[in-house]
Structure formats: C-alpha cells, structure tokens
Image (tube, rainbow, N blue to C red):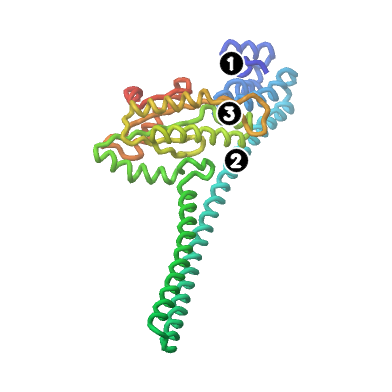
Amino acid sequence: MSKDNQKPLNASDFNHIINSLHLSKNPDWMGLLLFVRNIIYYFSSLSKIQKAHIQNRILHYFKEKNFSHKTLLEAIAILESALTETYQKEQKLLKNKLEEEINYKTKLIEEIAKIANLLLTGATKHKKELQTFAGDAIQHLKQNQEPQQLILFIKERVQQLIDQHTSHTQKLTQQIKVLEQKACYDYLLKNIFNRSMFDTYIQHKAPKIVAQGRKLSLLMIDIDDFKQINDRWGHLVGDEILKALARIIRSHTNVSGGKPYRYGGEELCVVYEDLGEDKASLRAEAIRLDVQTHSFRPPEHSDPPIKFTVSMGVAEMNSKDMPTQLVGKADKALYAAKLSGKNQVKKYSEIACDL
C-alpha cells in the first residue's frame, strides 16, 4: 500500500476520486471511502500496520469498481470483522495480563498461609518440647541425682531448645523476607517496585518529606509507540523491552538515587527525594539518552536489534500539592513531551503557563 493511501484525503482529492468513480450519487460508498481513508486514520487504538491492512482490504472493492449493494454489504462485513478482531485481541491481552496478576497475588496469599501454618505448627511443637522438658526435669529430681548432674542436664536441654528455636526462626525470617520482596516488587519487572508501593509512598511519605522543607520530584516515563512494537514483534517481545527499560532505569537509580516504580502498563516512574525539578530533569535526560542508544535484541531473534525511545515528564511537589496533584502535573508534562515529538523530557514548569 502506498504511503499516500495512509493519509486523509483533502476535499479536492476526495472530489476527484468520487467523480472518477462516478460515486456522487452513491452516499453509502462515499461514506465507506471517507471512513477507510480519513476517519480510520485518527484511530489511536490501531497501529499503522493494522490501518494499512484494513484499508487494503476495503480499497480493493474501489479498484474493482463493483458498487452494488451486495458488494457494499460484503465490504462492510469485512470492515466490521477486522475492527472486531482487533479489539478482541486487545481484550484477550488485557484478560491475560489480569489473570497473570491474579495468579501472582494468589501465590502470595498461599505463601502467607504456609508461613502462618509454620508459625502455628512451631508454637505447638515448642509447647510440647517444653512440656517434655518439664517432665524430664521432674523425673531427674525424683531420682535424687546430684545437683551438678541435674544442672548439666538442664543446661544441655535448654541449649537444644534454643538451637531448635533459632533454626526455626531463621527459616521463618528468610521466608518472610522473600515474601516481602515479592509483595513490594512488580510481578513482571522484578527489580521495580509495584503500583501499590508507589501509592503508599506518594500518599503517606511524600507529603511528610515536603512538610519538612525538603524537595521531592516525580518523573513519569512512557515508551514511545509501544503499541506498534507489540503489533509488529508480539507482546512477549514487548514485555522483554519493558524489562530492558526497567533495567536501565534501575541502573541509574542505583547510582544517582531515586525510587523506581511501575505505574501501569508501559508507564514507569521514579521519585527523587531532595531533588528539585531542574536537577531531576537532568537525571531524566541521562535515562532518556541511555534508552535512545540502547540496542535491544529479542531472545531467539536473528533480526537486527530493536531501537526504542521514551518520553518523560518531570514535576516537583510543593507544600500545597495533594499527592494526586503531583502525579497529575508529571503526567501533563509527559503528555506535552509526546505532543512535542516524543523522545524528550518536559518539565511541568515549562508548560504550566500554557495550560
């Protein structure tokens, strides 16, 4: 399909096509042409590849110049089927993502139940051991053993109880630590905190930091044209690209500070304590450049590396801001970066006067 077919028709071109195809008295076919050449162009839910595929199938009927009512219904059926199929795929993807998250949380709950059961079992076991110890001690007293022998017996049994209790406690502590990490980090991006952790931080800790007179800034990050990446390479590759971005962000926050979170979908964020908007935007620019130069090669793919970029919005929290306002400001800055051509960083202070 030529690139011209992917652009909306202007009035002059539209009239020319209508006249050349003798469609001026056929509003149904005129409407169909306008839909596949103009209206569909603005569908944000469809990628360029999907739009081109639909346009190719429908414009075929115009090339055939068979404008009967039967053919019209056939073309509309194809159009409806193509659009429905696209949205069904999106719904299936969302359903799968939701099921993954539900399964992840279900496993966490099961692990919590196991730990609770271990605590209960351990308490019962220790109680029985203490009862046995008390019975043995009484038996030794009844046997009129020497005090030195009785003390040695008590010392050995107490040490055994301590060792057993220590081993049990260490095992529980390790399991709780693993469980805590799973509960804090995103189920897909293992090195990035999850949305729940972000909400807790931004609602409770962030206001306290600002109330102390300290600075706090939020950086919102979104992968550019992520839908087209998914459509071309598949959602598994899209997930791997998201993981690659998370690794890049984590490598920066490990060195320069900042708390990275997954906000939702392909959108990540970083909270910078004790940094104002200007300095936080420098951190953002460093991440952006690192992503821009990163070459991602999908696992088991021999194709050339995939290049991708990110757009970012930065905002600083002031004493009058509610947590939701900080997120809103950073999100508006991100939106401005997208509108300005993507692959760039925008500060909220730069765009505030335009809102």
Q: CA distance from mark 1 to mark 2?
A: 33 Å
Badge 3 element: loop
Q: Label 2's element? A: helix
Q: Which residue is mark 2?
A: 93
Q: Secondary structure at mark 1?
A: loop
Tell me the crowding category of disc 3: few under 14, some 14 to 19, or many 20 or more residues within 10 angstroms, Cα based: some
Q: Residue at x 43, y 38 (%)?
A: 260
Q: Which residue has dot 3 on it?
A: 296
The amino acid beneath tag 2 is Leu
Task: Give the position of the N terminus as an image quadrant.
Answer: top right
Q: Is residue 319 above or below residue 107?
A: above
Return the x and y of residue 315 as percentages of the image width and height: 35, 31
As shown in the figure, which amino acid type bears the numbered disc 3? Phe
Neighbourhood count class around disc 2 (C-alpha, 10 Å): few under 14, some 14–19, many 20 upward: few
Q: CA distance from mark 3 to mark 1?
A: 37 Å
Q: Neighbour class for label 1 at 10 Å: few (<14), some, many (≥20)?
A: some
**Label 2 near label 1: C-beta < 8 Å?**
no
Residues at marks 3 and 2, CA–CA distance in whole angstroms: 23 Å
Q: Which mark is residue 9?
A: 1
Q: Position of residue 43 (x, y in %)?
A: 56, 27
Instruction: Kindly indicate whether the residue at mark 2 contacts the one at mark 3 (C-beta within 8 angstroms).
Output: no
